[in-house]
Image (cartoon, grey):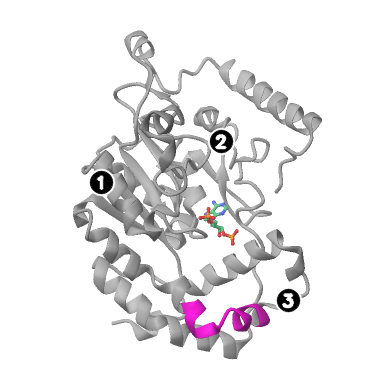
């Protein structure tokens, strides 16, 4: 947890900082969304027209945050997890979680566990059979590293556990398949929604060239291209693309809890340091996950440029 929301003074400081930055940017008199008066009057909370449904540790926060900079996209700050954890709260509650939008804007929410169960997908279908679904996947080798770094930061009892120990304790065969078998869950989702309603992108593309992935999403969502390279800057210290804080569009992510509003980078829990692989373990992980990767590429009719697998994929 980077930003200090733990104490009142910390939270207040943060709100003040956001407020100051917002005022600075507003002072530039830039109407970033170019909202007309009529649109302002018809602003309402609307159910999502698109959802980011998976996969966790694959860049879902970056995808959501980067998309939310588009003037025709709004997105709630938290993961509502309505179709998974909060279904009993009812649709009116779900709608109340959404930010205000105009009728030309689309609402997108991200809850990466929606893809896990067919029951959640059927509930989504009941809400809107035409909803668009975005899925982000990642090289299983790095997804595992990401999961380890995530768990290590969450569970103090893991402090002295090495990466190899962690994988073996989790039963390597079963665990690696669990973390690599995107195809089974996507196939399950295809049994509920037609394939044309999905956009499947990779974390590697988003990390290397965020605008190229945003372009794919803009096309998929029938939106005008609006996000350009100058919205992002590569932050050497973080090792990732971050928002350019002096760009007027940055105003639209000021309330995003997953963005550090001082640096423009995603918060520290996104982009953690990864453990290194012992070469033997790496080969084992690749061998176990290879059939899952092949299955995925066949299923989605595209291949991602995933290190360690390329030589096995034709
Ligand atoms: P790590 O923290 O292990 O590096 P999710 O949001 O689904 O939990 O995914 C988190 C992952 O998003 C991070 O995993 C990081 O590698 C990846 N990511 C992709 N683009 C990023 C960016 N611009 N800034 C930070 N993390 C990014």
Q: Is residue 304 left or right of residue 141?
A: left
Determine if the C-beta at disc 1 is less than 8 A from ligand 1.
no
Relative vertical location of residue 40 with respect to residue 273 in this rendering, above or below: above
Residue 172 lies in magenta, yes or no? yes
Ligand 1 resides in the quarter of the picture at bottom right
**What residue is at 73 percent from the left and 31 percent from the top?**
11
Q: Is residue 103 one of those drawn in magenta?
A: no
Give x and y (percent) for residue 312: 36, 85
Q: Position of residue 139 (x, y in %)?
A: 46, 70
Instruction: Determine the secondary structure under disc 3.
Output: loop
Seen in the picture, residue 135 relative to 37 is either above or below; the reply is below
Boundaries of the magenta span? 165-176
Q: Secondary structure at mark 2?
A: loop
- Which residue does the numbered mark 2 point to in the structure image? 256
Q: Which residue has dot 3 on it?
A: 161
> Which badge, 3 or 2, is on the more N-terminal residue?
3
Marks 1 and 2, how far apart in space?
28 Å
Label 1 close to label 2 by CB (< 8 Å): no
Q: Earlier in the sequence, mark 1 or mark 2?
A: 1
């Amino acid at each position: 947890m980077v930003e200090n929301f733990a104490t009142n003074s910390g939270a207040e400081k943060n709100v003040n900082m956001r407020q100051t930055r917002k005022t600075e940017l507003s002072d530039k008199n830039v109407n970033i969304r170019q909202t007309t008066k009529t649109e302002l009057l018809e602003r309402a909370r609307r159910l999502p027209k698109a959802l980011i449904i998976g996969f966790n540790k694959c860049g879902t926060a970056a995808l959501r945050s980067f998309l939310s900079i588009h003037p025709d996209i709004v997105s709630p700050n938290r993961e509502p997890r309505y179709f998974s954890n909060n279904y009993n709260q009812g649709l009116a509650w779900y709608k109340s979680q959404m930010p205000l939008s105009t009728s030309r804007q689309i609402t997108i929410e991200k809850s990466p566990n929606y893809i896990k169960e067919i029951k959640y997908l059927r509930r989504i279908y009941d809400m809107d059979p035409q909803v668009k679904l975005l899925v982000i996947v990642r090289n299983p080798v790095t997804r595992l590293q990401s999961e380890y770094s995530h768990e290590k930061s969450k569970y103090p009892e893991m402090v002295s556990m090495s990466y190899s120990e962690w994988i073996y304790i989790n039963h390597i065969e079963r665990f690696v398949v669990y973390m690599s078998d995107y195809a089974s869950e996507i196939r399950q989702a295809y049994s509920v929604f037609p394939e044309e309603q999905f956009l499947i992108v990779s974390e590697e593309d988003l990390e290397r060239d965020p605008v190229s992935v945003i372009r794919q999403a803009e096309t998929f969502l029938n939106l005008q291209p609006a996000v350009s390279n100058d919205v992002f800057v590569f932050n050497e210290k973080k090792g990732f693309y971050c928002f350019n804080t002096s760009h007027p569009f940055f105003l639209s992510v000021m309330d995003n809890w997953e963005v550090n509003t001082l640096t423009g980078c995603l918060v520290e829990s996104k982009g953690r340091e990864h453990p290194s692989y012992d070469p033997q373990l790496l080969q084992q992980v690749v061998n176990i996950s290879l059939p899952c990767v092949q299955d995925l590429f066949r299923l989605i009719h595209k291949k991602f440029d995933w290190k360690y697998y390329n030589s096995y994929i034709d």
